[in-house]
Image (cartoon, rainbow, N blue to C red):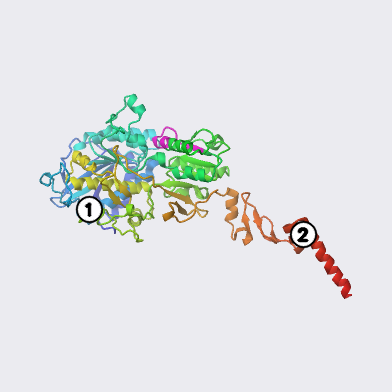
Amino acid sequence: FFRLPSALPLRSSILPSKEMFPRTPTTRTLLFLACCVAVGLQTTLTNAADPIPTLVTKNWPAGTYKVEIAVLHTGTGRFWAFGRDFLTVFHMWQDYVANKLGGLQATDLPNMTFPGFPGSNRIPLNNYQVEFSLFEVGAPTLAEMKQNVRTVGAYIANQASRFQAVIAPYSSDLTVETALVIQNLPIFAPAAAAREVFECSEDLITSGGYCFNASADPPRRFSNLFGTLAESDDYFQLAVRTAQLKQTKGVGVVYEPDNLFASACMNGVLELCTELGVPLKGNPVAYDGSDSTVLKNIDSGVDTLIGCVYNDTCTKLLAALKASNTAYSTTALSVCVGQAGLVDTVGPAAAFVTGPVQWHQRANDIQHTESPTFLMPGRSSFGMFPATVGKTNTSAMQFYYSFLNYSGGIAPSYHAASALACLYSLQFAIQITRSVLPATILQGMTFLNRGFGLRTFWGYIGYDSTGMMEEDDDFERLQFDLSLALQVVAPVRIATADFVFPSPTFKQRDCLSSTPVCNGQGTCQPSGICQCVSPYKGDTCSDQYSLAQTMMEDNGCRGLWIACLVLLIIFLLALGLS
């Protein structure tokens, strides 16, 4: 996929205005900066909602219609990096729809019948272009962002006739807030991984909280919510199973309090450790990044540390580990591993840190391949990145390089890939029903399930009965090496390096960073001192023993007798010659 020029409208404001900013390649930077400062803008609400579909005459030829998507955008605050990545994906898909597809054109699906959607009743889609309306909800704290989501969400719900769909902001907590307020539009969640977002818990039902269908099995919480991430309970399956395999002394857990994702992640770790018989040391430690003495609360018997944390808390935890020279056999952290900029923030503290991701550009199996025949015989390729299984130019790698092109060199996170999977789902629902009515889009989403899903660069797209992604728990596992390069260590079929266990101590890392290591004559020990091969000695193996010293070093007392014998023979030979 190559970037083509366009002038697609993108808007950003804390509350919407009627003004639209044409997006061209020369205005992208200014537009993004506007998104970042939009939280401070004050604009006037308008009650003049346009009918759907809206005829666009300002930036498009006559006869062009639009699909307007409301985005609750975190361009500022602690989740700003995810907002940045999502915005890049919106640009990519907007250009694709305009320049590759010529709009969201629905085509007949051969050999397929969809009850309730006879061709004669379908709305002909010829030139529906995409417009994203961005509503800034970012803030320094999660509590502030929740309030922003409630305010903006209420406005969107009241202006529902204007929009076809909603993109929820980053995090499980903010996705729940979005769905509680907006229940009359399809909501796509690219960054909600807590099962509790989609499924009604027993506590929720007994407390009388909102639950769309409490009698279903499992009970669905929101009828209009769809998420493309696998559940956070499974994030550290590989880490716990590795701890079992390596016979770890004990697992310790650090988690962010008052956080749906972190709580679900922590509970998943605790349950799996209990199931596999992996020893847990101490109670889970709550950590929000404000206490620099957090390590004192971690049990001394822990040698595998698992952190269910967001980006900013992750960086503070790594800084605390480095400051105290604490290196566990494994340090496994969520979210931040694989995010652009982590090494720039924490430097050498990132070395040998590992973490799970739900997508990686090296994915090359058939489930991650967009093929002209993946949907049905005779159907043209649905996705943006068609490829052939086994070739190097995979669908996942095409997305990776396309994202780099649009972002100015920033690598995509798995959350960015998830955002495009959301847009694929919306596109499919519109095209399969040939309708842009929100209620009909929701009906179209019922076809994306295990029986009929999409194979895409993201992997299989199919939703379970609660609206959460059906996933085979096939997480990729990454680990930083000594040079701070990020390596894939699992699954083996796409691995770029072996998993390092145990992780070297910080003193050992300093030793390993020397050139050549131990003067090429030894190996670095956990103490940071070299263990040298004979006849070399010293902390860095830069000195040598004499012959007698070498024999003593190698053989102890036996070496002493051998040395004495050699000296005696030399003495006798000297006497004989004289």
Q: Secondary structure at mark 1?
A: loop
Left or right, residue 352 beside residue 411: right
Residue 517: say if magenta. no
Mark 2 belongs to which amino acid?
Gly
Residue 262: say if magenta. yes
Residue 534 in view, yes or no: yes
How many numbered marks appear? 2
Q: Residue furthest bottom?
A: 577
**Image quarter hosting the C terminus:** bottom right
Looking at the picture, tell me which residue is in the foreground, 215 or 130: 215
Instruction: Tell me if residue 268 comes above or below residue 374 in the rendering.
Output: above
The image quadrant of residue 165 is top left
Left or right, residue 336 beside residue 522: left
Q: Mark 2, residues whose alpha carbon is within 10 Å: few (<14), some, or many (≥20)?
A: some
Q: Which residue is mark 2?
A: 559
Disc ID at residue 376: 1
